[in-house]
């Protein structure tokens, strides 16, 4: 397989004087013991402006960068609060969507110490693709994903087993990036692949050439939107019950429409969703259109919202949209709140207006940020780098393929070396298929 070409690009965000940090402070008891001294110092700072925060961060981050040199790689996702995105770039790191982040270790074998400020499944994906001499760390292992939590392997595997017993090689699993390595391995060993919001239509379209049925996990809305884009009739889709209502002994014959509906389905979709993206409505889209604004949304939004909008795409698509918008453009964006706040700040420097889709009269739900992503804050970044430099980094922050971490307690289940090697083999099959299909689509 040729090396993928996907690269991160500078966001264009600037650290502005007197600009308060947008993330709220975590309470002190949310920090593990090793990070508590850094949190105590941070919470004692008189304000959250760059003039105050940067000199404090420099005390810890700069020595770590000097110590590790070119072997250090800092990563962050677009959904991180503005200060983390800006700080990671300030210290030479990369900010990108989940597809580009996943490829960073693979693309840069010289990077041996990789520190990610994002959610756990993103760091785990980097670890799956990393070489044996590359170590992946997450600034806060309790930074999870609510969608991923709705599709744990122990929830999905019993139903996947029933489906594959019935359909055999005629069914392949496509696992959205927002899943654990354990589900990515399921995709790999069933002839499927991983997908992201930017390439789901390419992945599902390609896998359908080998299997007539797709088991799509875990997002109902990305699944429906992908099916619509590929021209799959909505009557040929079966969506499983929401995971919150799914009994542990669920039998696939109890699916909506029963076995006859499953037998006629081209896509069977897990019933998960992202709470951030299901607050958007067609009424909000209509309001912005009536006032002369373009509307663009993320494909984790419901299908009717996506169809009503002017465009839909990944965070990479949305950020590029803002970057390339002509002066005077007005864009209402339906996605995670921190992203829109960052986009608004950047757009203002270019004479472009950006607003969050929920900013309409009568809307009671404000544009929320990804609360679990925001658990990666400046004290965690400073502490992680300083502890790594001193050789005292907690093992709980090291990310290995197959790790399962409780977002509530931070407790971790780690696979044996033998089981981890098997998982990596299967999960890499799924990721390699994704990369091959995606890169071929760009030819």
Image (cartoon, helix red, strand yellow):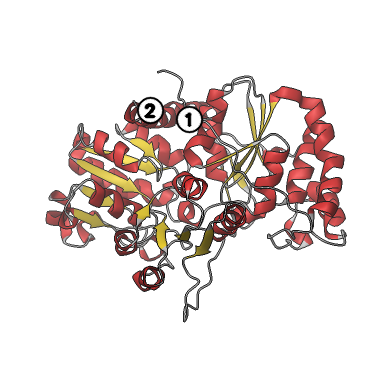
The residue located at (30%, 60%) in the rendering is: 303
Asked if residue 46 can be seen in this view, the reply is: yes
Q: For the residues labelled 1 and 2, say whether their Cβ atoms are less than 8 Å apart.
A: yes
Whole-percent x, y for residue 2 in the image? 42, 18
Image position, residue 182 (x, y; %) = 45, 39
Q: Quadrant of the C terminus?
A: top left
Kindly identify which numbered label has been placed on residue 439: 2
Q: Mark 1 points at which residue?
A: 6
Residue count near mark 2 (Cα–Cα under 10 Å), binned few <14, some 14–19, many ≥20: some
At a point 44% along the width and 26% down the height, the residue shown is 425
Q: In this view, does 197 lie to the left or right of 58?
A: left
Number of numbered discs present? 2
**Residue 68 vs residue 13, the one in the foreground:** 13
Distance CA(mark 1)–CA(mark 2): 8 Å
Give the vertical position of 411 relative to 185 (above or below): below
Q: Where is residue 253 in the image (x, y as percent from the top left)?
A: 20, 57
Q: Which of marks 1 and 2 is nearer the N terminus?
A: 1
């Amino acid at each position: 397989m040729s090396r993928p070409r996907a690269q991160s690009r500078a966001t264009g965000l600037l650290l502005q004087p007197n600009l308060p940090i947008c993330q709220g402070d975590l309470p002190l008891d949310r920090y593990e013991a090793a990070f508590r001294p850094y949190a105590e110092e941070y919470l004692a700072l008189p304000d959250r402006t760059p003039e105050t925060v940067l000199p404090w961060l420099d005390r810890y981050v700069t020595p770590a960068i000097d110590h590790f040199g070119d072997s250090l790689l800092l990563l962050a996702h677009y959904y991180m609060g503005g200060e983390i995105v800006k700080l990671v770039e300030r210290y030479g790191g990369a900010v990108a969507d989940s597809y580009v982040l996943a490829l960073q270790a693979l693309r840069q074998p010289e990077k041996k110490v990789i520190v990610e400020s994002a959610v756990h499944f993103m760091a785990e994906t980097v670890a799956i693709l990393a070489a044996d001499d590359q170590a992946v760390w997450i600034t806060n292992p309790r930074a999870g994903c609510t969608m991923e939590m709705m599709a744990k392997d122990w929830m999905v595997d019993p139903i996947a087993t029933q489906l594959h017993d019935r359909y055999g090689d005629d069914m392949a699993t496509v696992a959205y990036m927002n899943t654990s390595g354990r589900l990515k391995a399921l995709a790999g060993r069933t002839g499927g692949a991983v997908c992201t919001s930017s390439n789901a239509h390419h992945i599902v379209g390609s896998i359908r050439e080998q299997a007539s049925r797709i088991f799509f996990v875990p997002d109902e809305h990305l699944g429906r939107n992908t099916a619509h884009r590929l021209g799959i009739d909505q009557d040929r889709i079966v969506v499983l019950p929401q995971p919150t209502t799914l009994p542990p002994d669920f039998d696939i014959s109890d699916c909506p429409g029963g076995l006859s509906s499953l037998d006629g389905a081209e896509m069977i979709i897990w019933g998960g969703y992202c709470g951030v993206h299901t607050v958007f409505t067609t009424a909000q889209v209509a309001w912005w259109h009536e006032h002369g604004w373009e509307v663009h949304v993320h494909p984790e939004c419901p299908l009717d919202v996506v169809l009503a909008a002017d465009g839909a795409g990944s965070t990479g698509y949305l950020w590029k949209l803002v970057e390339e918008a002509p002066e005077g453009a007005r864009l209402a964006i339906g996605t995670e709140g921190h992203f829109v706040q960052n986009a608004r700040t950047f757009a203002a420097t270019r004479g472009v207006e950006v607003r969050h889709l929920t900013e309409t009269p009568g809307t009671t739900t404000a544009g929320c940020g990804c609360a679990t992503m925001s658990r990666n804050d400046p004290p965690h970044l400073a502490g992680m780098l300083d502890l790594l430099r001193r050789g005292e980094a907690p093992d709980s922050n090291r990310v290995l393929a197959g790790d399962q971490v409780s977002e509530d307690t931070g407790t971790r289940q780690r696979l044996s070396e033998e089981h981890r090697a098997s998982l990596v083999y299967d999960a890499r099959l799924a990721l390699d298929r994704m990369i091959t299909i995606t890169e071929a689509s760009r030819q």
